[in-house]
Each structure stands twice: as C-alpha cells, then as structure tokens.
Image: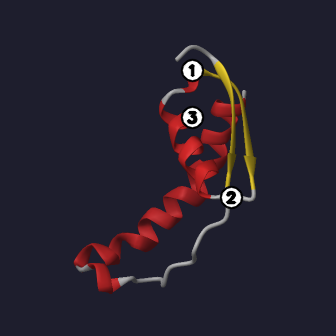
C-alpha cells in the first residue's frame, strides 16, 4: 500500500490510529470519527496480576499520546 488517505469510525478509527502510529510513512492523512473508549477500572484485576499495570499504562498514554499524534499528523 502506498501513501493514502484513511478514514476510520469508532473501532475502525482506533485500529487505523494504531496502524498510523506504526506506519506513518504510508499515510497522506488520517481522519478519525467518534473514536470512543470503554473506561476500565483503575486496577482491572479480573485480567490477572497484569491488571496492576493499568495505571502505569494509562499514565504513559496521557504523557505520550499528544507527542504521538503530533508525529502522525505532522
């Protein structure tokens, strides 16, 4: 796939966002529409002991998501 325009809605937008972070050289533009998320508990221990890492991952996302978006969008 060469450089292209991508448009994603809802879950498709989340998938395209992940794709664009890993493959920015393949994008001309990225349009995201109504990309929501399901809030998880602070410590989602139902997934096991790794659930205790959720706050760490959430904190990293808050710190770095704008930097990633700036790289993707330009």
Q: In which quadrant of the rendered image does the C terminus lie? A: top right
Q: Residue 17 carries which label?
A: none
Label 2's element? Answer: loop
Q: Position of residue 26 (x, y in %)?
A: 57, 20
Q: Position of residue 41 (x, y in %)?
A: 48, 84
- Disc 2 to disc 3, how far (Cα)? 14 Å
Viewer-closest of 57 and 30 = 30
Q: Residue at (47%, 33%) from the top-left corner?
A: 22
The residue positioned 24% from the left and 80% from the top of the image is 48
Q: Give the x, y percent position of residue 33.
A: 76, 52
Please report contact status of discs 2 and 3: CB closer than 8 Å, yes or no. Answer: no
Q: In this view, does 2 lie to the left or right of 54?
A: right
Query: Spatial distance from mark 1 to mark 2, Cα to Cα?
Result: 21 Å
Q: Earlier in the sequence, mark 2 or mark 3?
A: 3
Disc 2 residue crowd, few under 14, some 14–19, many 20+, Cα 10 Å: some
Residue 43's place in the image compared with 30, above or below, is below
Measured Cα–Cα span from mark 3 to mark 1: 8 Å
Q: Mark 3 points at which residue?
A: 20
The image quarter containing residue 70 is top right
Q: Residue 35 carries which label?
A: 2
N-term-proximal mark, 1 vs 2: 1
Q: In the rendering, at what x and y percent does residue 71 appear?
A: 64, 31
- Please report the residue visible at 54 percent of the width from the left and 57 percent of the height from the top: 61
Label disc, if present, on residue 26 of the rendered structure: 1
Callout 3 crowding tier (Cα within 10 Å): few <14, some 14–19, many ≥20: many
Tell me which label, 3 or 1, sits earlier in the chain: 3
The residue at 51%/37% (across/down) is 19
Badge 1 element = helix
């Amino acid at each position: 796939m060469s450089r292209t325009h991508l448009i994603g809605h809802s879950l498709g937008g989340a998938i395209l966002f992940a794709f664009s972070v890993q493959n920015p050289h393949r994008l001309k533009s990225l349009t995201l529409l109504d990309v929501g998320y399901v809030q998880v508990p602070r410590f989602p221990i139902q997934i096991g002991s790794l659930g205790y890492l959720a706050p760490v991952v959430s904190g990293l996302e808050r710190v770095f998501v704008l930097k990633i978006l700036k790289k993707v969008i330009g």
